[in-house]
Image: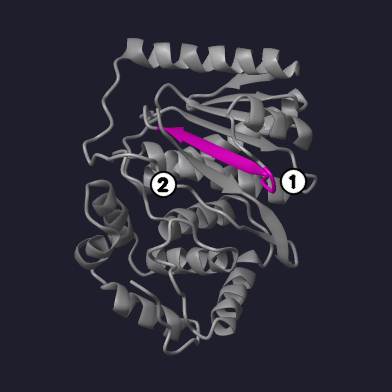
Amino acid sequence: MTRTQSRSSRAPVFLAVLFCVATAARMAGAQTAEPWPKLSAQQQAEAISQLKDFANQTQSTLKRPLNAFETKYFLFCSDLKPQEAQNWAGLLDRMYVKLAEMFAVPKGENIWRGKALIFVFSRADDYRRYEKEMMHTDPTGTAGMCHASSNGIVRIAFYRQKDALNFAHVLVHESVHGFLHRYRTPVNIPSWANEGLAETIATDLVPQSGRRNEVITQARENMRQHGGDLGEFFTTDHIEGWQYPVAETLCTFMIQNGKRNYVNFINGIKDGLSWRDSLDEKYQAPVERLVRVFGNQLGVRGLRAKY
C-alpha cells in the first residue's frame, strides 16, 4: 500500500504569518482517473471500525490516553481538554462543508473512506512519536502531516501549537490536502495548486486581521527577490518555502476571476488531464497568459516560469 504524505512545517516570515516549507509528496505508482469506488453502508462501517482500531492501537502504543470525538465526517482523537477538542472538530466540519459546496459535492455526502482520522496531541514529542512509531515517518521540522493512502484512508496528525490561530491554520491546511485526495478520483493535484488551495481555505476559515494583504505583499516581494522568475513552481513535486505565498495568492486570484472555471480546472486534473491542458481547456487560460496577467496584477511585469 502506498501513501502520499503532506507536511506542514512553519517558520515566521512576517508578523504572525507562517508558511509551509514542504508539500505533499506524489503517491508512488500508477494513478487512475477512475472515480473512487462507491462504498456500501457496510463497507463504510467496516472502514470506520478499522480506523477506530488504529486509534486504539495508537493509544496503547504511545501509552497516551486519547479522547475520541466523532462527527459526521471526522474521527477526532486528542489528549486536549474535551471542550477544546470539540471546537477543533467543529472547525474541520466547517472546512468540509465549505469545500463540498465549492466542488458541488451533494449536501451531506461523505467522500471519505469511512471518515478522516485526526490526531491532535498536546505535546510535540507525542506527535513526533506517533509519526515515527505509527506511521514510520520522520516528522523533523513539521507541525502536522497528512497521510493519504492509495486505498483511500486518510490519517492526519498535529501537535497543538501555542498560538491558537496558527494551529487552526495548520489544522485546516492539512485537512484540505486530505479532502483533495479523496475528491473525485485518486489523481494527485500538483503541488502549486494543492498547497495554494490549502492555504486559501485556511486563510478563509481562520481569519487573521490583515493576513490576506500581507500574503499578497509577501508574494510580490518574494517574486521580485527571485528576479521575476518562478522557476520550477509549476513542475516541481514540492514547491519551495518562498513559493507558498505565491501559490496562495495565485489560487485566490484564479478563484476570484473565475470560481466555476477554477473548479472545472481541478475537476479536469482529477479526470485525467494534465494541469497544463486543464488550464487551457477548463480554466480557459493558458499558463503563459495566466502567469503574465497574474504578474501584472501584482506589479511584477515580465513574470516567468518553467513549464
Residue ID at (49%, 55%) = 195
User: Which image quadrant is residue 60 in?
Assistant: top right
Q: Is residue 35 left or right of residue 121?
A: left
Can you identify the residue that label 1 sits on?
164
Horizontal and vertical percent position of residue 245 = 56, 67
Q: Which residues are magenta?
A: 140-149
Q: Residue furthest bottom?
A: 301
Q: Is residue 134 above or below residue 181?
A: above
Residue ID at (70%, 33%) = 127
Q: Is residue 134 left or right of residue 286?
A: right
Q: Quadrant of the N terminus?
A: top left
Residue ID at (41%, 11%) = 46
Q: Secondary structure at mark 1?
A: helix
Q: Is residue 252 above or below residue 90?
A: below
Q: Is residue 11 above or below residue 137?
A: below
Q: Of marks 2 and 1, which one's residue comes earlier in the chain? A: 2
* Nearest the eye: 143 or 95: 143
